Structure formats: C-alpha cells, structure tokens
Image (cartoon, rainbow, N blue to C red):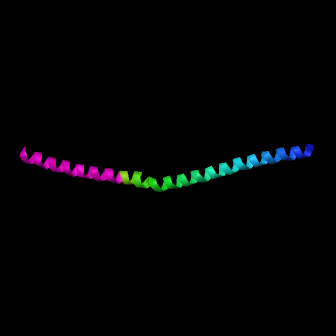
Amino acid sequence: MDTQIWNSVLSVAIGAIGFIIKNLFDEIKRLQILVNKTREELPKEYVTKNQLDADINRIFDRLDRLEVKLDKLVEKHA
C-alpha cells in the first residue's frame, strides 16, 4: 500500500513538473516569435546610424552652399 501511495505522489509530481516545463518552452517559443517580428518591423520605423549621418551631411552641404550664396550677395551689395 505504501508503494502505491508513493507511486501516485511521484506521478503527480512528475506530471506537474512536465506541465511547468512545457509551459516554459511554449513561452520561450512565443517570445522568440515576438523578437523576430520586432526585428522585422524595426527598420520600417527607425533609421540606421549610417542613414542618419548621410542625411545630416546632405543638410550641412546644402547649408554650406546657402552660406556661400549669402556671402556672395553680401559682397555684391556691400
């Protein structure tokens, strides 16, 4: 009788541990899917550092040309 109770307790404990491990693996899988989706969507909304540097350099180039034009106008009217 003692072994039957012990077997029942072990069965319930192993079943509970198996259930917990299965839930943990399911959660890990769900999180991996979310990370992959985030990795795919991130470039759609944000700019990379290289793209930002290129855009800022274009802006500064235009400002430099504008400054040259303004200097020419000031020299012309001075």
Where residue 64 sits in the image (x, y, percent)?
A: 23, 49
Q: Is residue 8 magenta?
A: no
Q: Is residue 54 magenta?
A: yes
Where residue 9 sits in the image (x, y, percent)?
A: 83, 44
Left or right of 8, for residue 46: left
Residue pushed farthest right?
Answer: 1
Left or right of 7, for residue 42: left
Residue pushed farthest front?
Answer: 1
Q: Which quarter of the rendering shows the C terminus? A: top left
Residue found 32% across the figure and 50% down from its top: 56
Left or right of 41, for residue 18: right
**Residue 42 seen from this side:** yes
Residue found 73% across the figure and 50% down from its top: 18
Q: Classify residue 29 by image quadrant.
A: bottom right
Mainly helix, strand or loop, the magenta region?
helix
For the residue pair 61 and 39, the one nearer the viewer reads as: 39
Q: Which residues are magenta?
A: 53-78
Where residue 58 sits in the image (x, y, percent)?
A: 29, 53
For the residue pair 59 and 64, the one nearer the viewer reads as: 59
**Residue 47 seen from this side:** no
